[in-house]
Image (cartoon, rainbow, N blue to C red):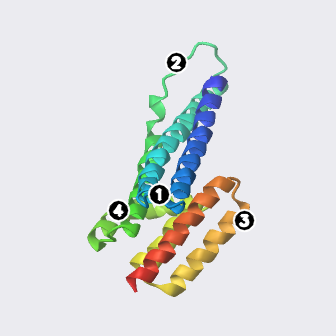
Amino acid sequence: MQNTITRMSTNSFMIKGWCITLVSALFALATQGANKDYVLVAYFIIPVFGVLDVFFISCEKRYRALYDKIRKQNTTDFDMNINQFNKMLGIQKNEFLCELLFLELIGECRKEEVDRLYTRELKKYIEATSSYVTRQRLLYAYAKLFLNDDAEAAKARKKYEETCLSYPFEGEIAGNNELIDLVDDLAVKKK
């Protein structure tokens, strides 16, 4: 069972690496005079890899819960079925909704769609996962692009930068910094 948990963790790490590699390559191609549409492909790749990452993290957490349950029972006869821990699938749903909300904010930014996605449940989830740079990036985009509130955006930007200082994944920070720059560019174009 420990090997299964390790494999899920490794897959999650590799997904992040592939995502950063592909996005970096696409941005490099776009800046080297190739077709600028490569940048747009990156905004499709990020949510896709994000969903895959959430899947592996969710599986890892469910296997950890199963491991903990078996450890407490002190038995060698057990079932590896993790479906009993399916309430963790809500994590995947909320991660996906966070990325959908961000895409709506940097896309058409329709009020009815933002209101539909940004539910009370999602707000609680965002608050609970506020130590993630992606969450702070989302809150910055919300303040800057949807609320058009520069004071609130400045607070969100400061919180984002503080979160980056203690965040362990430099590649993820770099990718989110590029998305923050995109939000800034879009905010300038909106004015």
| Viewer-proximal residue among 176 and 156 | 176
Image coordinates of residue 33 in percent, x first then y, are: 50, 61
Distance, label 1 to label 3, CA atoms, is 34 Å
Q: Residue at x 60, y 61 (%)?
A: 133
The residue under label 4 is 117
Q: Please say whether residue 143 is visible from this viewpoint.
A: no
Q: Which mark is residue 34?
A: 1
Q: Residues within 10 Å of mark 1 (few under 14, many from 20)?
A: few
Q: Amino acid at mark 4?
A: Leu
Quadrant (top left/top right/bottom left/bottom right) for the C terminus: bottom left
| 1 or 2: tag closer to the N-terminus | 1
Q: Nearest the camera: 127 or 72?
A: 127
For disc 2, the marked residue is 79
Position of 127 relative to 172 (above/below):
below
Q: x%, y% of residue 86? A: 44, 36
Q: Secondary structure at mark 2?
A: loop
The amino acid type, in three-letter code, at marker 1 is Ala
In this view, the mark in front (4 or 3): 3
